[in-house]
Amino acid sequence: MASETIALNLVDRGTRPIGDRLHDWVVTVDHKKLGILYILYALLFLVIGGIEATIIRIQLVVPHNHFVSPQVFNRMFTMHGTTMIFFVFMPMLFGFGTYLIPLMIGARDMAFPRLNAFSFWMTAFGGLLLYFSFIGGNGLYGAGNAPDVGWFAYAPLTSRAFSPGHSTDFWTLGLLVSGFGSIGTAVNFIATILCMRCPGMTLGKMPLLAWLNLVMAGMVILAVSPLTAAQIMLSIDRYLGAHFFDSQAGGSAVLWMHFFWIFGHPEVYILVIPAFAFVSEIIPVFSRKPIFGYPVMVAATVCIGFVSFSVWAHHMFTVGMTSYANSFFTITTMVVGVPTGIKIFNWIGTMWGGKIQFRAPMLFCVGFLFQFLTAGLTGIMLSASPFNWQLSNSYFVVAHFHYVLVGAILFTIFGAFYYWFPKITGRMYNETLAKWHFWLFLIGFHLTFDFMHIPGMLGMPRRIYTYEPGRGWEIWNLIVSIGVIFQIAGVLVFVFNLLRSLVKGETAGSDPWDAWTLEWSTSSPPPEYNFAKIPVVKSRRPLWDIKHPEDPDWKYE
Amino acid sequence: MKAARHEKEWGRVVGPVAGILILLAAVLLAASLCSAATGPAVPSIFKPESTPADSIYGLSLLVLAVTGIIFVIVFSLLAYVVTKFRRRASDGPEPPQVYGSNQIEIAWTVIPVLIVLVLFMATARVIHAIQDAREPKGAIEVTAIGHQFWWEFRYPGLGVVTANELHVPVSDPSHPTPTFLKLLSADTDHSFWVPRLAGKTDLIPNRVNKMWIDPHEVGVYVGQCAQYCGMQHAKMLLRVYVDSPEQFEQWIQEEKKPAQSSDAVNEGRRIFETTACINCHTISGTVADGRFGPDLTHLMSRDTIASGAAPNTPENLKTWIQDPEAIKPGSLMPAMKLNDHDLNALTAYLETLR
Amino acid sequence: MSSGAIARPLIKPEWALPSRGRVGMLSLIAAEAAIFTIFVVAYIFYIGKSLSGPMPKDVLELPIFNTVCLLSSSLTIHLAVRALRNAKVGAFGLWWFVTIALGAIFLVGTAREWQRLIFEKGLTISTNLFGTTYYSLVGLHAFHVTAGLIFLAIGMIFTLLGKVKPEHSERAEIFSLYWHFVDAVWVIVFTVVYVVGR
């Protein structure tokens, strides 16, 4: 491989005026800076979304609590869901992709650097617009400000009749704007991955992170657009007197559901596939083996990408579709579990026979494996349509999807933070603090989300600001709320670790993990131009070939 | 690297500890499930008392068994891998680099596909059994209309209209008298969920849904609205009273009668008939025929008011009329702003509506 | 290839990847196709479901002339791009202009149809489900035609200023993909609204 690791470290620590340095960040089109901006933005909203969740759990810790009013509670769960999906996970995952993809494919930037910047600022703006609603909007019955219609904003609750004022419009427009940002990023990912790979890196030789982000980007293109369309329809209903979802004029509330979930279901795969990408990079390195079954991993992901567009109405099993429709969506949902399960087996196969090092990134990935297994199985339970008639819209579903979002995706994000922190900042994080983070968060996660399944099975619906005593729900809600304390503690340790290591961490060097993909061949942090000479690769693990010239990968692939 | 020593001691501990913690959680979960579902007031899906809920329960046992077995197998594999293949020495050559195995891939594709087929076939049977059930001759027909934030129940064949508390007869398997419900909505989406009797079905405006129940045991079954419908979604509670055939017959006869009138409460009745009450409420036998709010003809036959938000006592009635926000903030009942005298008279009148 | 290409002196000649402009534009077209699909699905779903008001067969007339203009503009833009590739900048400018004219005629035609529908037939977006779905679908398409015309106009200005050179033919071609997409959408809209839905 031809690229040199020598690079001028252009990071100056405090020699230029702060105004100039901030200006650099605002006008940047460099994928690395934009990636960091995305990640920091997402981290900020993670904290805000966490505060919203904490308010919810304090209100629900005992029945008939008066911590917040129903108006505030309904705004909290709406904003919590909307924030976490659109302004935490999407930007976080786009951010890591934006930072890593060019480095991993041996390119100097994304295909469209200015589009990259535009997409970030659109996303950022969308979030600010949504949060401006706290000051500027009016909710249900004209009382309130932030949207309170739930993150999926079912019609006709969102119509002018039931949502006067502007709170729903902040939801619609904030997401519309950030949706354009998402599509822009997806276009950029596809063009970059297909058109900018370094010589020798055929599609079959690029890192799994690139493959998985390619599939994810394709899904964004096809899934976010329906949401955009539905939001345009909703806005036309609200402002031009149209009747798309107006039941008085013959409009259909169920049509909104179809349009929303055609977006909504692929969306959750859009979130989980980049998480798979992190795991597929981290587990091999810390097991000291290549990923088991690379072609199958690619095929399974592509399969998931396609099949996930056929399952959406499993969110609508209770809506009164025919038994044939219900059966169809049951089988497709069960089928999508097969390639997903295959991936879990392949990760286990990667670890099998390896020499596993339990550094922080690997700890989080192991947590992911156990938890994603569980989440997938509760998903299979929910796919059985009659079982779903009991479990849907209950705390069982809330527990299931938090198991995926927090137990699987957030855990891998934490893992990715620790894994690539040395590359991005040039400093090593503190391993002890990282382990404290892991264990505190793990305990909190399980306290909250394991026990959350139970009230669902005992009849507790979701989105209720209080509940009746005597139904057997009290003790479980108490435990669930207690778990929040540990999660907060874990996240505080995490943020402290990041900040402290930024200032005081040891120098990391270009390849602290003895890894094998191209980003580890640059300095830490990489120079602005990434590679002095564009690399030429012969296998999936170019650095392995360099480090083991007697036994290179390209002999076996 | 400094981390090497550190990592040895962690490595020994991580796998088993993580495994134990998670197993503990799983065991607790299972134990709590078995113990939690006690008491008649607990609307547990695992204590079904009606055929739809029974079928779902049966299916759920199969699904839980299959997923449980998968969980145990994969969990054990993971726990094994995480303990057996930890790095022991800080140096040493890289382990054998294995790239994949086609046979293994085929095996762990085919087996899940077979599992999916089995699960699907079992599920499809239950879907059809519940959704496509025919309505027998002896069925009771109820039209349920969802409102923000209360339930309207009409028995078209029996000439009865009531609210929030549904009465149905117990159904004897040899001579079934199930209740078939038609589900409509007057405003936004709602969902009828009484876990021990059936899965939930949504009430959607401009759409007719249907469901059925055939309760096996007399008693009261609780539930609530399960589709977010606005501010007071949380207090749109449901009570289903499963009566013996005689009790049900008696209830129907009482409900069919118009409101009782008694001279002792004339003043209260006059207040009711001359204020805005009649715009929203119906009391059959009087001029009040509003449909926006619940039918009050037999208000006193109900155990709760405000769709379960408060017990039906004179004190609560007074509070509900004067200051509904105190009981159910955001409900569509306006504060009537009566003076004390009128309020007492009105309440006395309402108390006679048995 | 666009002029911002990275210098790669060591590349073996056979390492050729697709052009990023083309891939980017095709991805964008896929996203737009998905948006249009949802509007078309809504249109089809609501056929015959209006509770009142004018029905399609009462008020719609086949916009044959408009359609011919728009579809011909696909041909003219293709001719323009071919001319530029063959270094005939003058011919390029001419065909590019004709494309704009045809697109503008289409928009004017749509405007006139809407004027007739609103003021003579009383059909607005809020009249009934047909009005809602018709104006939103045709309107979304017209919006995309308008956006295309703006870009075409910018190209026209650059041509008149003499700044367009044969090496820009790839860019023109990538833009023409967008224009062809807009025309293809019209074929579908026409079929669904004026043929099937009437």
Image: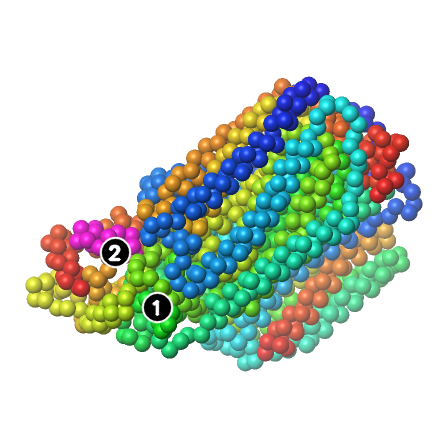
Dot 2 corresponds to which residue? B304
> Callout 1: 10 Å neighbours few (<14), some, many (20+)?
many
Above or below: residue A528 compared with residue A201: above
Q: How many marks?
A: 2
Between marks 2 and 1 in the image, the one whose residue lies nearer the viewer? 1
Above or below: residue A538 compared with residue C120: above
The magenta stretch is B305-320
**Precedes in sequence: disc 2 or disc 1:** 1
> Callout 2: 10 Å neighbours few (<14), some, many (20+)?
many
Give left or right: position of A177 versus B108. Answer: left
Above or below: residue B66 compared with residue B292: above
- Residue B170 occupies quadrant: bottom left
| Badge 2 element | strand
Q: Name the residue: 81% across, 25% down.
A: A6
What is the spatial separation of the Cα atoms under label 2 and label 1, in whole angstroms? 25 Å
Extreme residue toward the right, this view: C13
Q: Percent from the top left, x then y, of residue A334?
A: 60, 57
Q: Name the residue: 86% across, 48% down.
A: C16
Q: Which mark is residue B171?
A: 1
Give left or right: position of A412 versus A164. Answer: right
